[in-house]
Amino acid sequence: MNRETLLKRDELKTEKVEFENGDFVYVRQMTGRERDNFEQSLVKESQDAKGNITYERSLSDFRAKLAVCTVCKENGDPIFLPGDYGALSKNISAAKLEKIVNVAQRLNRITDEDKEALVKNSDAVQDGNSNSNSAES
């Protein structure tokens, strides 16, 4: 592959997820940037009394955040805004959310080991000069 081929936008796979009552949604792959933003949304920044900034990773609302990043229209356009995960987490059944997340994890190759690594990596000290465009957390 050459530079032009690699820089051309990939066609992201989408998959229809059907629920028992006949309702359905589409779930899609994320781009590299979207995956990074998703992972960054699992990071919480805190500052101690001395002004030192530390980062802690948390799987809080992991499923809803992943759903917000991957649920889309049939054409692949997202239907949620980054801040929608809180309402989604409170209002959707765990069974329905889990069905969405199972497809999103498979399409985006997010394994249980990946989730564990996100939490384990929270022990690593990061500098306080983060300049990200992460999703709300």
Image (spheres, grey):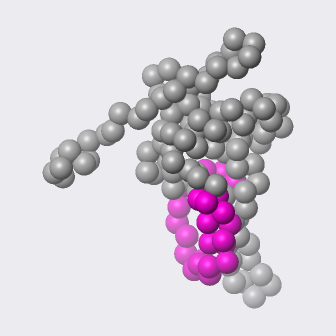
Q: Quadrant of residue 70?
A: top right
Q: Is residue 28 left or right of residue 128?
A: left
Q: Is residue 27 left or right of residue 12?
A: right
Q: Is residue 41 magenta?
A: no
Which one is in front, 20 or 9?
A: 20
- Placement of 126 over or under 24, stated as above or below: below
**Residue drawn where x is 58% and y is 43% of the image:** 105
Which one is in front, 93 or 83?
A: 93
Residue at the far bottom: name it: 50
Q: Quadrant of residue 119?
A: bottom right
**Residue drawn where x is 55% and y is 70% of the image:** 130
**Residue drawn where x is 52% and y is 27% of the image:** 15
Could you tell me residue 121's position as x and y percent? Answer: 62, 72
Q: Is residue 97 left or right of residue 28?
A: right
Which one is in front, 36 or 14?
A: 14
Could you tell me residue 104's position as x and y percent? Answer: 58, 39
Residue at the far top: name it: 22
Which residue range is magenta in the image? Answer: 113-137
- Placement of 10 over or under 32, stated as above or below: above
- Placement of 68 over or under 50, stated as above or below: above
Could you tell me residue 56's position as x and y percent? Answer: 70, 70
Location of the C terminus (image quadrant):
bottom right
Q: Is residue 135 magenta?
A: yes
The answer to whether one can see residue 68 in this image is no
**Residue drawn where x is 62% and y is 79% of the image:** 124
- Placement of 6 over or under 100, stated as above or below: below
Could you tell me residue 68's position as x and y percent? Answer: 63, 38
Total numbered circles: 0
The answer to whether one can see residue 123 in this image is yes
